[in-house]
Image: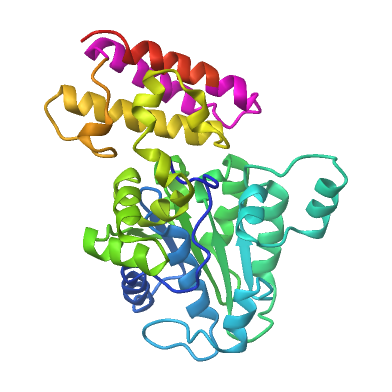
Amino acid sequence: MNNAASPSAAPTSTALAPWIAAQAQSLLAQRGHAWLLAGPSGLGQYALALALARAWLCDRPTAAGACGVCASCHAIDVHTHADLCVLMPETVLLDLGWPLSEKAQSEIDGKKRKPSKEIRVEAMRDTVEFAQRTSARGRGKAVLVFPAERMNVFTANALLKTLEEPAGDVKFALATDAAHLLLPTIRSRCLGHTMLWPDQPSALHWLQAQGLPAAQARVLLRASGGRPADALMMAPVSERWSLLPKAVQRGDVSVFKDWTPAQTVDALHKICHDLLAVRAGAPPRFFEPADLPKGGSWASLSAWGKSLGETRRTVEHPFNAGLMQEALVSQAQLALNLKA
């Protein structure tokens, strides 16, 4: 799964992981008004985008980035900086503690609608208007877009002209784990940066610095496929992780208690991946070999993986979570109990 809290969540600590700090320093040394930060989820795209914005707006920036103590840095820490526009789906804004616009907050509080999972055209229009205003603090302005793939064609087109001809001193940081879903015209108007994977010792050291015991950090880093930000978000499920494959084979839905359908699908996909890898003679990636059940044929596992891929595309629709989990586990149990 991406994490145990929300598909869009990210660590809230202001201390940058060393591999993110190194990337920020490298990008800040280069010229350009728009960066597209892309790579698999869990590699710190949001953290890097925010680090760039902090440095661009900082009162006393250094070659390494923002100073962290000036009035500008404090304003970003408390999510009130007048020269920073954070463009996100409303669900992500709420997850990360950023304020909604007054109109959006009023509509949601009044039960007129639910928070949007896409970046709304209205929010994009506000961003275009923001880009045209004069800087409040005199250090220029910054726009952070995350996850950038949540722009539909209308919001992307609304951003396009501002990216092409930014008014005044405004810089953009677009962060995504699905760059292929962005319009080619958006990608072509940004400088591209591919997120770097940290080595395992660095990732484990960072996870332990966030308060995870060494053994738990190793389990979670493996469970996340080596993605530290995802591993940190999975901390609440670390004790259950190794139990999942055999519990699913028994049809035990309770192991997914308090999980969203998206998290459940992601975990099942990882079980399926590892079982197919073992059948092909490769080592498992997300689980230890002893955690995996013996059943499942190549045909049943392949069909199960294909079905999970189709389910992933609609998993955020408003289904009944409990019923959906029962159906998913039943499907998994059937695939896992067919003899090889």
- Residue 128 showing in the rendered view: yes
Name the outermost residue toward the right: 110
Expressed as whole percent of the image width and height from the top left, the position of residue 253 reads 50, 24
- Residue 178 showing in the rendered view: no
Q: What residue appears at the point 61 percent right and 24 percent down from the top-left corner?
A: 322
Q: What residue appears at the point 75 percent right and 40 percent down from the top-left corner?
A: 114
Q: Which residues are magenta?
A: 296-325
Name the outermost residue toward the bottom: 60
Q: What residue appears at the point 32 percent right and 51 percent down from the top-left corner?
A: 221
Location of residue 151 with respect to 206 vertically, above or below: above
* 262 with respect to 155 (left or right): left
* 5 with respect to 235 (left or right): right
Expressed as whole percent of the image width and height from the top left, the position of residue 55 reads 48, 79
Instruction: Tell me the chief SS of the magenta region.
Output: helix
Expressed as whole percent of the image width and height from the top left, the position of residue 208 reads 35, 65
Q: How many marks?
A: 0
Expressed as whole percent of the image width and height from the top left, the position of residue 92 reads 61, 51
Q: What residue appears at the point 35 percent right and 21 percent down from the top-left corner?
A: 305
Location of residue 329 with respect to 159 vertically, above or below: above
Q: Where, by quadrant of the figure, is residue 339 drawn?
A: top left
Q: Looking at the figure, which quarter contains the C terminus?
A: top left
Q: Looking at the figure, which quarter contains the N terminus?
A: top left
* 331 with respect to 140 (left or right): left
Location of residue 87 with respect to 206 vertically, above or below: above
Q: Decide whether residue 116 is among the magenta residues.
A: no
